[in-house]
Image (cartoon, rainbow, N blue to C red):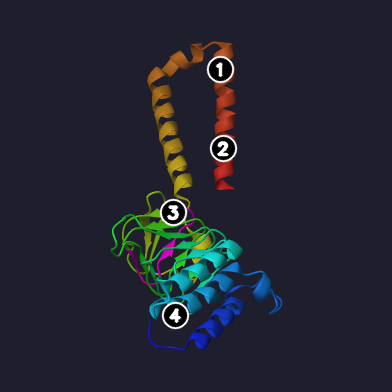
Amino acid sequence: MGQISLWRMIKEDFCIVRKKDPAINSSIELFFNYPGLIALVHYRIAHRLHKVGFKVVARIIMGLTGFITNVDIHPAAQIGRRVFIDHAIGVVIGETAEVGNDVMIYQGVTLGGTSLDKVKRHPTIEDGVVIGAGAKILGNIRIGENAKIGANSVVIKDVPKDCTAVGIPARVIVKGRAKEASAINKLPDIDRALFEYLLKRIQILETTLDSAMGEDVALLSEEHQKEREELDRIYAAFLRSLKG
């Protein structure tokens, strides 16, 4: 993390909000509308106290902070410079978590542990990582530099640097750094892709079945034909909604 004064780190925390959030209009909003910033500033102070032995005091500070901001950061966690916790409600950062510089964390993110032993049990987040809303990163794993974690993903394995991971459990779907620094909103929709694949497979099977039946299709009852036409209309409408 490097040696840097507490007040300089706090100043950077304030500046990064103005840099990364286009919604801000006035500096006064920093004190009333950014629970992530307030929690981070309190963490900076509590972390210094924790390091010099005032662990109970540090825990009390962060306990009160959690009550005020709904952000739970353990004072022993290691958080780097220029970290932006956007909206922040529901964010949890565990005791042995390590967060690098220039990391962006959205609301509802958990950097949690999977062990009850007093060991390194929380994730390490390297520089430049973007973690989407609601994502859960669990265990002593490493998220590589400039990686992106999709919203609501559950990550239980390492993610290499410059990669994008989504899903439950999360898997890497994009390798190589995205062109935009915060392209979390440009992640591919893997559920939609799966639906499209299944629909195409069904269409192939139906076409094959119709060919095999040949003239027997013409002998279907009028009621059956109407049902089939209605299903075809529903199917066509669903395909149009996917394309839209």
- The residues bearing labels 1 and 4 have C-alpha atoms spaced at a distance of 75 Å
Q: Vertically, is 54 above or below 209?
A: below
- The residues bearing labels 1 and 2 have C-alpha atoms spaced at a distance of 20 Å
- Residue lying at 37% horizontally and 21% vertically, measured from the top left: 212
Q: What residue type is labelled 4?
A: Arg
Q: How crowded is mark 1: few (under 14 residues within 10 Å), some or many (20 or more)?
A: some
Q: Which of 243 and 91 is in front in this view?
A: 91
Q: Is residue 170 left or right of residue 238?
A: left
Q: Which of marks 1 and 4 is in front?
A: 4
Q: Where is residue 10 in the image (x, y as percent from the top left)?
A: 53, 82
**Residue tagged 2:** 238
- Residue lying at 58% horizontally and 75% vertically, measured from the top left: 20
Asked which secondary structure carries label 1, the reply is helix
Q: Is residue 241 left or right of residue 6?
A: right
- Residue 153, numbered label: 3
- Residue 225, numbered label: 1
Span colored in magenta: 142-153
